Structures are given as structure tokens and as C-alpha cells.
């Protein structure tokens, strides 16, 4: 009951405002990547069938039902095909929903596309920015409302990003959709996006946040379980921003990160999280697989085959989750098993065929006895009898697989040769795609058929006897990553490998103590390069000491002190051990500076100070190295700056052990370290000898008990 | 004409995208749409009824295809077709009566009426009606004292028969259209007032200090219970919440606000509570010709529990919910699986659905409807009164003509 009321309220509010601008959307019908090659050499990605309906249909249907009134479809690669398709479909003559195409041949990125649209001057108000491969059933009402309200309060709130919770696989750092894990820092109250990182460096196991981020925001929450839906609600300023910054290419990598870093203009990005609605973008073959399954499992309701019925066929959902269309013209032979697959129109599938997890498009011929597992088979492919697909294969249009031929795993097969200027570098992908556009465009304009028939393939080609097509050589960059993005399920050993790597990584982290176990907002994760010059070190120590003294005198709380020391640590690029050393030094200095008459009195002083500030100190002492650093520091003090401590060394060490500031292992390894040292250095080891002896014996006693 | 097309397409779109929900709203909108289709349809001099029927059929077919699960659409389309047939017939009989012709050779008439002997107008009308609609108990009782002159009370187009007695031939086309629109207006009226008519019977069924159980939310049930409350009956209501949409919560809120003693229970507690219940009263999505009920999910369980404890299971249904079709494999064919997001949070379970990286493959299924077989239903209360499940087919024969059961355009018919 709540929803209709809201929407009616919104409409009336809109009427109050000057003129009601129709809700517009920009649909970018090109992903400007090469992830769907070789298929996208011949057909644009937005026209690829997703559960037997072109992807763009899902996006347009959603936009229409979400109340968008005007859509600009930006076509670039294979623009003619997209426009032809739209002309044939019903999209051009819908009431209350206009679709306009904008064609551009020389755009190589989303940034270029938006600049072209800006020049056309067609966008007049807030608009929805999506790509043509988005599948969603979300209602835009709430997100739009929030966006408008924020905009009213703060004209710098230019964009609202839609996100959805989705857990990532911790072992391989990738989401269900095959995209990389995204780290986002969001202000929990205002929902402002503060940090966005989709290419985190996992080798270090660390994440670098600007310290100003922590200083400026009273609270922020760091997420890695959010999925970016690539649905953005933008204010018109976004377009002009793209025009002003002509180097913005990628929507996320350049634009979003650019705005987040740039604090001069002060533009802000907010997020809108959807809970029960579905939204996902098809970015690679894995997300093609995942989204197809989500559609089949009806998460996208009502965008499901039996409700949406594109075209003339009617699909019915039958028992055991089988969707069956009538009048489809697909024939399936005897004793054929098809599991978890989608089969298109007009296919001929022979007998004794085994198909599992495959996406078979239209007019495919599969002869008897074939075995297909986890592959994508495009239109017009013929698989001769007895041939097989290993997991992860992509067969592009009209490929013929020869008799008894087994297509090796992860191979990509096409009638077209692989473009030469393939490069794994993302930046070059843009340049690369331009050449691909021009080279394939003329082919899409009708020449392709004749050209293909002209090409003479050997009877015994790369695809076995009678096979037609090239198996694309694997490019070096892609080789490592192909298992991440293919339709095939990730094999056990890859996951085990990743888990193992993760464990190693964790060990590494624990050794270096760069990440606090809770993973909370303690950005003490900077790896110092250990070439600090002494000046800096002294400055740092001094600063810490001053901070500590101020804390003592002004009665500052422990955790505030920790925060201050943290910020010092960041600005001086130090590690936790340095902090521990400096803090310990400051404390001892303070204790020794307090008036004391006897050694006993001094010990008491030390105990009092350590007891009071123990928490601050121990927060930097998670690890043995840091504790050793403290002992060394203490030693140094006893020798140099505060000789009063010299006789009390063992006593205070014992005290610190009792208070759990320093652990047994640290003391023992300190002793170990000192074994080879000069006699002069061993003074304190000797002094503490009895204590160490006691420590060594203690565990045995424990065992006896 | 183009306006109607736009209207039809818009409605089809809304049905397709599942934006209209609830059989009452759908029924009403369908009736309104068909009314405008009829009013804009240009009728030829001859075969006006056929022209109208074809037009309505064409639209009805589209609407049914748009959402085959929403049976109310088809019901209303068939009702309107029936109205056209009846009006045409009554006009024809009136004309015959006026002219006192010995042989009816009028080409505007329906085929089945060719060989009537000369009779009085009333007799002809009665005979004509009985060809269109086999005599029901009600009509038989009515017909006994005097013949068909008594206006018919069944709510469809029946009562407009007696209205137009003398019409001159030239204006018959306009007259037919006018009458049909009148009758459709009445139908719309009936749909919007069916709550009241059902609720009027509440006191006959709910007695003092009874305990009533219901599941989910239904406007009809709400009105029914409130009507009994207004008549100073005091009784208790148990509301099963109706997972996964939990509309029972809304119903409970509404009932409590109106001062009824209401208790919310979980769906799974129905069996535990049923022994204290005197009557189960529920709403329905559709009532099939065999007396089976398509109802919100969970009701079959309630019906079984009620049967086990011999508690009467009463279904309230407006006449627009009566569907002339027999259910075949209703659990599948007359069901709709909605988004699993109503059941559980996608984000929380997303790792269980990541089958590709070995996270397991979780399936969630969320059917909307249950099929309650007729033997589990004790009583139907419609706007015409209480009926046994076995009587449903008769009631349906009152509202629909057998020719319209399949709403598909005949390949070649007139026009």
C-alpha cells in the first residue's frame, strides 16, 4: 500500500515544481571492452540473446516499466545492427516511451559517448545512465526521490549509484558476476560514497585509504560485499563534467574515482542500495551465465521468459523448472540429456547428446553423440557427430566443429581471425576497439556472408575433419584470467590454489602485522620502505612524545591518543613497531622525569604510567617484532638517555611481562638475538638471566601439571 | 478507434508487467476497457452482434494472453460476450413480438433462432433465453408462476431483457450497442459493489462468540467480518500471516483498528489452532467450474486442517471470480512463480547461489497460488448467496454462454 501513495505524492510534487521534465535515460549500447570476443566481432553485445531474448530488450523493458519516458540509445560498434533491430522491434512505437538512437562511429569509450550526447543537447534534467546489458527489475522511484532531495539540499550531489549486496568469493576475490571485488567506503548516515576501488592489489593484502578520509568523516563504513549495478542516476552536470575533463574515459575508473579524489570542485556521489530488487550488469561470460541463471530462477520477476514473452512464442514454466516454448521449431533426439542449459530457436539436436550448462543460441545443429559442457554456442554452429566441447568454450557464429573433434577447454573459436593488435592492457583496449569497429562494420553490412563463403578452409582444419573456424590463440594477458570470466564453473584446483594463496597471504599479513584482525577501520597498513632517515625518525619520536605528554596533561582519553598516534604514523609513514618504540620511550621518559627519590619510587612511577597507558601501547604490540622493538628501545634508554633504569631493567621487564605488554616469546627471541652480540651489549641479558631462565622453565612446569 | 488501441495496449502492458494486481481491480478495468471498445466499435447494418462479439473477442484474446494466470480478465471478457448475445436476443424477440411475424427470417438474428413458431412475446423471450442459458434452479422457480416477464435478478446482463419492447428496425444497431453498454455498466457496478452484497450475508454465517480463522488478506473477507461486527456480533478472528507476502499483517491491523478482537498466528500454527476455530473464512483468486479454488498460497494447508477437524471452510468470491474453465494441472498451469526475493535476502544468500565457484546451488521457489480441490470447500458465498461447490457449474452457466468458453477469434465470421 505504501508504494502507490509515494508515487502519487511524487507526481503532485513534480507538478508543483516549475515544469515537469520527462524522465530521461541514456542507454549505452556498447561496452567498449573486448570481453565478449570473438562473438562481438560479428554482433553487438546488446543483441546477444540472454535466455532467448536480446539483452537490450531486458534493459528497455525495465526502463519502460520503471517510468522512464525517453531513452537515448547510444550505438557505436555495429550501430547499424542495433538500429535495424530496434526498428524492427516494437520499441519505436510505444506510447509514453520514446526511443531515440544516437549513432557515433568514433567513440571509443563511455566518456566519448557522453560527450557526444552532451553536444546533442538532448538531456534536460536528471537522467538514468545504464548500459544495454543491464538486467534489473528495480523501481527507480525511491532512488530518484532520494537523488532529487539531495540535489535540492546540495547542488554538488551529482550522481547516485545503485548498489546491491552480494557476497564475493573470498578466495578468488571475485563476485558471482565474475567481476573483481569492489571496495567502497560509504558514509553510513548520508550514504555518500567516499572511496571506490575495483582494482585492489591483493598481493599485499592491504588497502590504502587517504588519511584525510578518516579525518574528515566522523564515520564511514568499508564494504567489500557490494555489487556495483552500473545503474546511475545523474544530474545533467555529469555530462558537462565529462566534457570538461576530456580524459575521462571509463565511468568508474576515471569518472567516479576522479570525482572522489578531486576536492576542489567538491562534487559528491551517493549510493542507493537495493534490497529486494534485482540488478546486474553482464560484463563477461561468467556474468552472462550467472544472470541467465538468475533470470531462470526468477530473481528478475517479472522479467522472466514466461511472463515477458518477447516475440511471437509463448513460453510456459513447467514442472521441475523447465521453461518450454511453443512454436519454437527446435528438435531434440532420443536419449539426449540437457541439463541447466538454454536452447534457442530452430535447433536440431541429435540422439545421445549430452548437454550440460550450455547456452545454445538459434539454428544450431548438434549431431548424434556430441558432448557439450559449459559452453556458449552461437547461431548457426554445426557440431558434427561425436564432437565435444570441453568446459569454457565459446563457439562464435557458424563455426563447424569436425567429426570426433574435441575443442579444448577455454578456447574461443570464430570464423574470423583474431585481430592482431590484441593487447591485454586495458588502456589500449579502447584504441583497439576502434580498429575492430571499422574492420567489422563493413562486414556487418551484408558482405560478411559472401566473404565467409569465399574463404576456403582446409578439410582438415584446426577444428578436425570438416571443421570450419579458427581457434584463437590465447593472448598472454588473458591466459591467467580466463578461468575467472568463462562460463565454466571454476575448477576445484583453482579454488584450492586461491585458498592456499590466501592463507599464505594471511600469514604474510600476520608476520608484518599490517592488518588488524578485526578488519575494522584501522588503516595502519602502510608498508614503510625502511629507509627512513634519522631526521624523520627523531621528528617522529619527538612528536609522539609531545602528543603523549599532552595526553597526560590534558587527560585525553586512551583511544583519542591512539588516533593521534595513528595519524602521526600515517603522516610519517611509519609502521606499528616504530609507534610502539616511540610511545614506550615517551612513557619511560615521562616516568623518569617525574620526581623520584629512590629506585623503588622510580619503579612505582613506571608501573603507574604503564598501567595507565597500557592499552595505547599494546594496541601497537600485536606482534613479536614490535615487542622486541620495545625491549631494544628500553635497552637503548638504559644505556643512553635514562641511565637510572639500568639497574631496574630486569625488574621492569618482569613487570611488563606480568602485565602482558610483552610476551614470553618476544623476550626469548630477544635473548636469542643477543647471543652473538658483543659482550658489552649483553649486560642486560645477563641482568635478566634469572628471569629468562624462569621463563624457559615455566612451560615445562605447565606440562607437568 | 486508435484511442482504443492505445488503451488496449496500455492495459496489456500493465497486465504483462504484473502491475495490476487483485482480481477485483483487474476485472473492473477489463470491463471498463471492453466498454470503451464496444462504444467505439462501428457497427454495420447487419450482423451487429457478430461485429461486436468479434471486436470484444479480439481484445479479450489479447488481454488473456497478457496474463493467463489472472483469470478475472477472461471471466469478464466472457461475461461481456454473453451480455452482447443476450441483448441481441432480447432485441430480436422484442422485434418479433412487435411485428407478430409468423416466420422469423431476419438476417440480424442469431442462427439458432430460425424455427420458432408464432408465440407471444413473453413466451418467445423465455424460449430464447432457455436456448442461450439452460434453465437454472432460479429461473425455473421464477418461470413457474408467470413466464419470463419478471425481470431477472441474476446480476449479469439478464435483467435488461425486459426493458426494450418496442424498437423500430432502423435504430436497432444503435439500440443494441446502447443496451450492451448499459448492461456492461451494470456489470461494472456489480463488480464494485460485490463486497457489500457478500458482506450483507455475514450475519447469517457468523454467530455470537465464534472464532473465525483466515489467511492472508482479502478485501472481501475484511468487509465480511466488519459487516458482522457492525451488526453487533462479537467474535474473535485468527489471522494467519500469509507468508511470504505477510498480507495477513495488514488485515490484522485493519481489523484491530475496527475494534475486532484479532490474533495473528504464523501459517505453520494453523493446524495447532484449528481445533479452537468454528469457521474458516477466506478469499479466493478464482473459482473454477468444478468448484475448485485458486487461492493464495497456503490455503490448501488450511483447508486440509479444517477438514481434519471438521471445521467449515467458507470461500468468499465475487461473481467476477467465477471462471467457466475446468482446472487442468492447476498447481502448475494456473500458478505463477514470483521472485524469490520475497522469501529471502539476495545479498545474504548470494554466496550460496554462486554455483560457478563451488558455493553451492541454492534454488528458491515462490509460487503464488494454491489449488484447493472442491471436496475441501464447504460453502461458497458469492454476491448471489451461498452455494455448494457442486453447484458452481450451474452458477457459471448463468453467467456465461457455452460458445464463449474459448475466447479465440473464429477464422472467418461475418465482418
Image (tube, coloured by chain):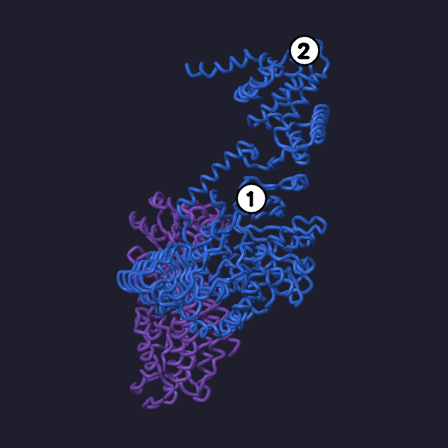
Chain colours: A blue, B purple
Q: Nearer the viewer, residue B387 or A284?
A: A284
Q: Which of A378 and A424 is in front in this view?
A: A424
Whole-Å distance between the Cαs marked 1 and 2?
A: 52 Å
Identify residue for label 1.
Answer: A201
Q: In this view, does A151 lie above or below B88?
A: above
The quadrant holding residue B403 is bottom left
Disc nearest the viewer among 1 and 2: 1
Q: Earlier in the sequence, mark 1 or mark 2?
A: 1
Q: What is the x, y in percent for residue A470?
A: 42, 63
Q: In this view, does B388 lie to the left or right of A170?
A: left
Q: How many marks?
A: 2
Q: What is the x, y in percent for residue A270?
A: 62, 50
Residue B239: assigned label:
none
Label 2 crowding class (10 Å Cα cut-off): few <14, some 14-19, many 20+? Answer: some
Identify residue for label 2.
Answer: A601
Q: Which of B244 and A507 is in front in this view?
A: A507
Amino acid at each position: 500500500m505504501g508504494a502507490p501513495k509515494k508515487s502519487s505524492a511524487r507526481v503532485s510534487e513534480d507538478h508543483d515544481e516549475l515544469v515537469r521534465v520527462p524522465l530521461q535515460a541514456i542507454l549505452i549500447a556498447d561496452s567498449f571492452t573486448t570481453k565478449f570476443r570473438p562473438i562481438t566481432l560479428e554482433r553487438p553485445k546488446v543483441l546477444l540473446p540472454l535466455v532467448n531474448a536480446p539483452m537490450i530488450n531486458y534493459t528497455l523493458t525495465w526502463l519502460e516499466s520503471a517510468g522512464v519516458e525517453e531513452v537515448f540509445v547510444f550505438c557505436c560498434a555495429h550501430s547499424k545492427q542495433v538500429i535495424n533491430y530496434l526498428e524492427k522491434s516494437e520499441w519505436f512505437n510505444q506510447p509514453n516511451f520514446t526511443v531515440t538512437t544516437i549513432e557515433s562511429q568514433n567513440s571509443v569509450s563511455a566518456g566519448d559517448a557522453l560527450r557526444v550526447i552532451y553536444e546533442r543537447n538532448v538531456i534536460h534534467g536528471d537522467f538514468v545512465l545504464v548500459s544495454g546489458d543491464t538486467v534489473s527489475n528495480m523501481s527507480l522511484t525511491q532512488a530518484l526521490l532520494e537523488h532529487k532531495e539531495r540535489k535540492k539540499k546540495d547542488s554538488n550531489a551529482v550522481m547516485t549509484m545503485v548498489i546491491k549486496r552480494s557476497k564475493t568469493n573470498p578466495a578468488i576475490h571475485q563476485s558471482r558476476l565474475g567481476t573483481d571485488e569492489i571496495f567502497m567506503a560509504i558514509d553510513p548516515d548520508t550514504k555518500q560514497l567516499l572511496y571506490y576501488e575495483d582494482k585492489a592489489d591483493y598481493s599485499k593484502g592491504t588497502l590504502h585509504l587517504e588519511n584525510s578520509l578518516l579525518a574528515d568523516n566522523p564515520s564511514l563504513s568499508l564494504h567489500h560485499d557490494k555489487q556495483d549495478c552500473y545503474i546511475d542516476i545523474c544530474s545533467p552536470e555529469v555530462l558537462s563534467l565529462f566534457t570538461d575533463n576530456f580524459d575521462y574515459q571509463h565511468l568508474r575508473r576515471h569518472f567516479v574515482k576522479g570525482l572522489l579524489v578531486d576536492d576542489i570542485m567538491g562534487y559528491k556521489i551517493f549510493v542507493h542500495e537495493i534490497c529486494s530488487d534485482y540488478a546486474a550488469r553482464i560484463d563477461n561470460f561468467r556474468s552472462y551465465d550467472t544472470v541467465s541463471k538468475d533470470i531462470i530462477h526468477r530473481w528478475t520477476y517479472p522479467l522472466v521468459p514466461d511472463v515477458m514473452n518477447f516475440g511471437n512464442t509463448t513460453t510456459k514454466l513447467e514442472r521441475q523448472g523447465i521453461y518450454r516454448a511453443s512454436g519454437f521449431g527446435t528438435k531434440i533426439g532420443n536419449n539426449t540429456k540437457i541439463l541447466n542449459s538454454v536452447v534457442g530457436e530452430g535447433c536440431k539436436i541429435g540422439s545421445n547428446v549430452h548437454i550440460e550448462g550450455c547456452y545454445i543460441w538459434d539454428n544450431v545443429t548438434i549431431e548424434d553423440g556430441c558432448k557439450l559442457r559449459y559452453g556458449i554456442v552461437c547461431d548457426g554452429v554445426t557440431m558434427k557427430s561425436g564432437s565435444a566441447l570441453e568446459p569454457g568454450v565459446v563457439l562464435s557464429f557458424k563455426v563447424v566443429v569436425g567429426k570426433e573433434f574435441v575443442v579444448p577447454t577455454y578456447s574461443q573459436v570464430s570464423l574470423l581471425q583474431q585481430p592482431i593488435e590484441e593487447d591485454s592492457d586495458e588502456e589500449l583496449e579502447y584504441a583497439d576497439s576502434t580498429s575492430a569497429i571499422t574492420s567489422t562494420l563493413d562486414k556487418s553490412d551484408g558482405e560478411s556472408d559472401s566473404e565467409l563463403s569465399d574463404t576456403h578452409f582446409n578439410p582438415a582444419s584446426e577444428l578436425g575433419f570438416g571443421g570450419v573456424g579458427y581457434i584463437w590463440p590465447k593472448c598472454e594477458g588473458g591466459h591467467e584470467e580466463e578461468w575467472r570470466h568463462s562460463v565454466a564453473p571454476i575448477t576445484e584446483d583453482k579454488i584450492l590454489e586461491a585458498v592456499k594463496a590466501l592463507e599464505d597471504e594471511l600469514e604474510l599479513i600476520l608476520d608484518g602485522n599490517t592488518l588488524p584482525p578485526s578488519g575494522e577501520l584501522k588503516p595502519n597498513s602502510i608498508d614503510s620502505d625502511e629507509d627512513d632517515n634519522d631526521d624523520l625518525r627523531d621528528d617522529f619520536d619527538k612528536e609522539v612524545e609531545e602528543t603523549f605528554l599532552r595526553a597526560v596533561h590534558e587527560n585525553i582519553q586512551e583511544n583519542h591518543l591512539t588516533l593521534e598516534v595513528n595519524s602521526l604514523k600515517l603522516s610519517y609513514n611509519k609502521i606499528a613497531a616504530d609507534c610502539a618504540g616511540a610511545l614506550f620511550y615517551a612513557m619511560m621518559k615521562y616516568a623518569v622525569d617525574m620526581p623520584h627519590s629512590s629506585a623503588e619510587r622510580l619503579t612505582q612511577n613506571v608501573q603507574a604510567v604503564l598501567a595507565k597507558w597500557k592499552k595505547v601501547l599494546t594496541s601497537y604490540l600485536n606482534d613479536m617484532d614490535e615487542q622486541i622493538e620495545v625491549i631494544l628501545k628500553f635497552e637503548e634508554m638504559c644505556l643512553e638517555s635514562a641511565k637510572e633504569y639500568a639497574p631496574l631493567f630486569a625488574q621492569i621487564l618482569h613487570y611488563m611481562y606480568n602485565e602482558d605488554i610483552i610476551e614470553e616469546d618476544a623476550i626469548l627471541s630477544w635473548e636469542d638475538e643477543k647471543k652473538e652480540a658483543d659482550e658489552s651489549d649483553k649486560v642486560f641479558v645477563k641482568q635478566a638471566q634469572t628471569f629468562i631462565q624462569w621463563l624457559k622453565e615455566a612451560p615445562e612446569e605447565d606440562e607437568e601439571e | 478507434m486508435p484511442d482504443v488501441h492505445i488503451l488496449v495496449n496500455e492495459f496489456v502492458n500493465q497486465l504483462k508487467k504484473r502491475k495490476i494486481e487483485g482480481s477485483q481491480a483487474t476485472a473492473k478495468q477489463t470491463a471498463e476497457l471492453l466498454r470503451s471498445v464496444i462504444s467505439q466499435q462501428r457497427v454495420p447494418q447487419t450482423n451487429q452482434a457478430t461485429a461486436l462479439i468479434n471486436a470484444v473477442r479480439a481484445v479479450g484474446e489479447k488481454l488473456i494472453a497478457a496474463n493467463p494466470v489472472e483469470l478475472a480478465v477472461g471471466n469478464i471478457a466472457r461475461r461481456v460476450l454473453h451480455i452482447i448475445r443476450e441483448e441481441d436476443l432480447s432485441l430480436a424477440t422484442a422485434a418479433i413480438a412487435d411485428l407478430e411475424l409468423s416466420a422469423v427470417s431476419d438476417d440480424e438474428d442469431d442462427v439458432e433462432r430460425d424455427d420458432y413458431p408464432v408465440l407471444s412475446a413473453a413466451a418467445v423471450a423465455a424460449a430464447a433465453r432457455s436456448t442461450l442459458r439452460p434453465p437454472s434452479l432460479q429461473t425455473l422457480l421464477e418461470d413457474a408462476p408467470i413466464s419470463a416477464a419478471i425481470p431477472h435478478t441474476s446480476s449479469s446482463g439478464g435483467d435488461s431483457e425486459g426493458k426494450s419492447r418496442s424498437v423500430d428496425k432502423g435504430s436497432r444497431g444503435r439500440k443494441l450497442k446502447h443496451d450492451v453498454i448499459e448492461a456492461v455498466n451494470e456489470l461494472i457496478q456489480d463488480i464494485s459493489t460485490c463486497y457489500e452484497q457478500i458482506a450483507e450475508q455475514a450475519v447469517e454465517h457468523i454467530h455470537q462468540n465464534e472464532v473465525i480463522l483466515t489467511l492472508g488478506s482479502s478485501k472481501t473477507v475484511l468487509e465480511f467480518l466488519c459487516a458482522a461486527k457492525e451488526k453487533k456480533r462479537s467474535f474473535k478472528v485468527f489471522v494467519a500471516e500469509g507468508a511470504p507476502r505477510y498480507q495477513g499483517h495488514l488485515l490484522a491491523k485493519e481489523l484491530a483498528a475496527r475494534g475486532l478482537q484479532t490474533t495473528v498466528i504464523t501459517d505453520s500454527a494453523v493446524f495447532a489452532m484449528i481445533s479452537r476455530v468454528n469457521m474458516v473464512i477466506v478469499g479466493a483468486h478464482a473459482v473454477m467450474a468444478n468448484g475448485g479454488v485458486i487461492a493464495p498460497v497456503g490455503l490448501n494447508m488450511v483447508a486440509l486442517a479444517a477438514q481434519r477437524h471438521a471445521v467449515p471452510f467458507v470461500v468468499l468470491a465475487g461473481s467476477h471470480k467465477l471462471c467457466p474453465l475446468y482446472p487442468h494441472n492447476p498447481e502448475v498451469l494456473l500458478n505463477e512463480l514470483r521472485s524469490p526475493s520475497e522469501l529471502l535476502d539476495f545479498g545474504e544468500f548470494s554466496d550460496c547461489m554462486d554455483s560457478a565457484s563451488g558455493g553451492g546451488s541454492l534454488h528458491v521457489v515462490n509460487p503464488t497460488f494454491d489449488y484447493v480441490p472442491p471436496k475441501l470447500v464447504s460453502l461458497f458465498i458469492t454476491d448471489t448467496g451461498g452455494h455448494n461447490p457442486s453447484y458452481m457449474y450451474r452458477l457459471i452457466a448463468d453467467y456465461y454462454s457455452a460458445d464463449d468458453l474459448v475466447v479465440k477469434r473464429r477464422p472467418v465470421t461475418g465482418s
